Amino acid sequence: MSLNLTSNKNEKHNKIIKAAIINHSNGNFKLASKYYKIYLKKKPNDYKANFNFGSLLIYLNDYEGSIFFLKKAQKIKKNHFAVYYNLGIIYYNLNLLDTSIKYFQKAINLNPKDFASLNNLANIYKEKKKYKESLKLYKKSIKINSKNYYIFYNLGIVFHELGKHREAIKAYKSAIQINPKDYITYNNLGSVFNEIKKNNSAIKCFQNSLKIKPNNASALNGMSIVCQLRGEIQKSINFAKKAIKYEPNSILSHRLIANTNITKLNDSKEAINQSYKALKIHHKVTNFFNSSVSVTKLKHDVLQAKYILKQKLHINGIKEFIKTGEKILKKKINFLDKKNIDKKIILSSKEIKLLIPYYKKEYIYKSKSNLKNSLNPKLNWSEIERNYFSSSNKQIIYIDNFLSKETIAELRNFCLLSKVWNREHKNKYLGATCDRGFISDIHLNIAKDLKKFLPKIFGNRELQTFWAYKYEPKISKGINIHADSAKVNLNFWITPNEFNINENSGGLRVYDEPAPKSWPFAKYNRNTEDIMNFLKQKKSKYVDIPHRFNRAVLFNSDYFHQTQEVNFKDRYEGRRINITYLFGSRNFYVPV
């Protein structure tokens, strides 16, 4: 952010603005702020002072003030690209990405060679998963500065997301050529090689990363993943434990160890223990990025805290958390609707101090471990298995009254009370995974009983993972169309029917066209545009299976699928919750 010395005939005013600029340049932002305020009272229409003060307030997280002074500067001197650039930065920090895009685009229109605006705009499109727009802008940036390491690094990420592994490898290698000492790029390159089953190349990348930065946990975790993919379980555990030695708060390392036990279903106690360790570390290191929290996340967490307190359970800081959170959410600016679902709240230091103790405390519901049956014993499981393999059903069926009454009651308690909903997704749903706290004997017994009661479907197939998603009522768009890297997908719902406003929706749409075998994971799992074009070309049909309490959908994981429209009553216990289990491997699976 540039600083400009403002000339002034009045010597006193000149000294004040000089003091503002000197303190600004030296990082004394609060003192500089005082001088700018004094100066602008006397010289309110000084463009450079308004611009500088607006720019400084970004560092103090006073975005409202920053916007005011920058827009004032824009009125005084129209069409200066630097004003639009700074406004783009502010709205990005507020997570108002569409508004940020508008201002970066204005900066580029005024200065087509504004490298910073081009690069930031490309990064936003990358974040919004609009990869084609992102690629165009990165390529323009390269024409301006072909020696910038970060452009090639980001290009590698975009190509990887698109499943274009050859281009991703080339981009990462270009980044390494410019900056051969960056160990992170080697780690990313190793991940690409993993995905195309070039394990030896992946190992070389992680070894190069370790040469640059010995004992970096990311590379050791990368080696752990390679070993899991090779079936070398003990080696995988050893690398993860070594990573923990050098980085005790490595969540990924504990997740990897938990995963080795989860997939084998041979040591429930150790699987649960490691998963809970990963969750405990998550809470321990929790903080607010850019002093902000999304409206939807805070809303969920406050509602959950109130529900926990209602059950007469006490967690450190819970009452202050509820009081502070409710006060923040009641502000008109933080009201939720479909136009501002991505809005973030900028928290004051006082608000952070009141919220953080509760966020740092873990709580997991202790479910009963002595339940007689996980699955409903009254169902004819042999007939269900026959139906699945029936040619007319194309390996897409649903099972009503799937779980025993005791099991689904305990699962609901676990999902409503456990503080495991820590992963935010763009379409406004929260995720919980088996290797980060979403696990108990009940969860694992469901997997064991599936193998027992449906042996032809699950018997010889290894459990890969399981997770759950919880959705923001009314405004959540659900999960985009994708296929999973597994052989069999089991998805079931545990929210009572009374909360689903539209009984013909809220479930799952499954297409009867499998993902092409040649498609890499990133393409069939994330590339929505290519998937829809493929299904249109194939004239694929689909099956809509509406939401029902305790209904499971069982289907071939090669099939593309997506969430139906989500429209549930806005009550905490009425949020749509689905749980997914994956068995078997399609062609590639990332262990975590």
Image (spheres, rainbow, N blue to C red):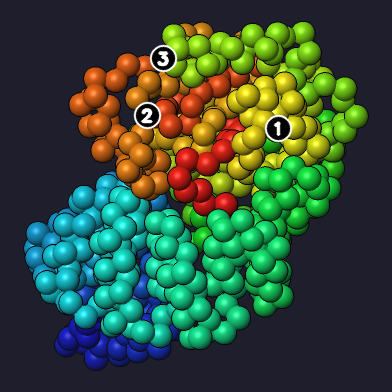
Q: Quadrant of residue 421?
A: top right
Does 52 sit left or right of 497 as displayed? left
Dot 3 crowding, Cα within 10 Å, few <14, some 14–19, many 20+:
few
Q: Distance from label 3 to label 1 (Cα)? A: 25 Å
Q: Check if mark 2's residue and mark 1's residue have beta carbons within 8 Å.
A: no
Instruction: Tell me where residue 308 appears, x and y as whole percent.
Output: 77, 35
Give the quadrant of residue 427. top left
Task: Please give the name of the residue rendered at 59% of the width and 62% of the height, measured from the top-left corner.
Answer: 227
In which image quadrant can residue 447 be found?
top right
Mark 2 surroundings: few (<14), some (14-19) or many (≥20) residues within 10 A: some
Q: Amino acid at mark 1?
A: Ala
Residue under label 3, please give it.
Answer: 543
SS at circle 1:
helix
Q: Kindly check if marks 3 and 1 are in contact, taking CB atoms under 8 A apart as contact.
A: no
Question: Is residue 354 at least partly visible in the picture?
Answer: no
Residue denoted by label 2: 514
75 horizontally vs 488: left or right: left
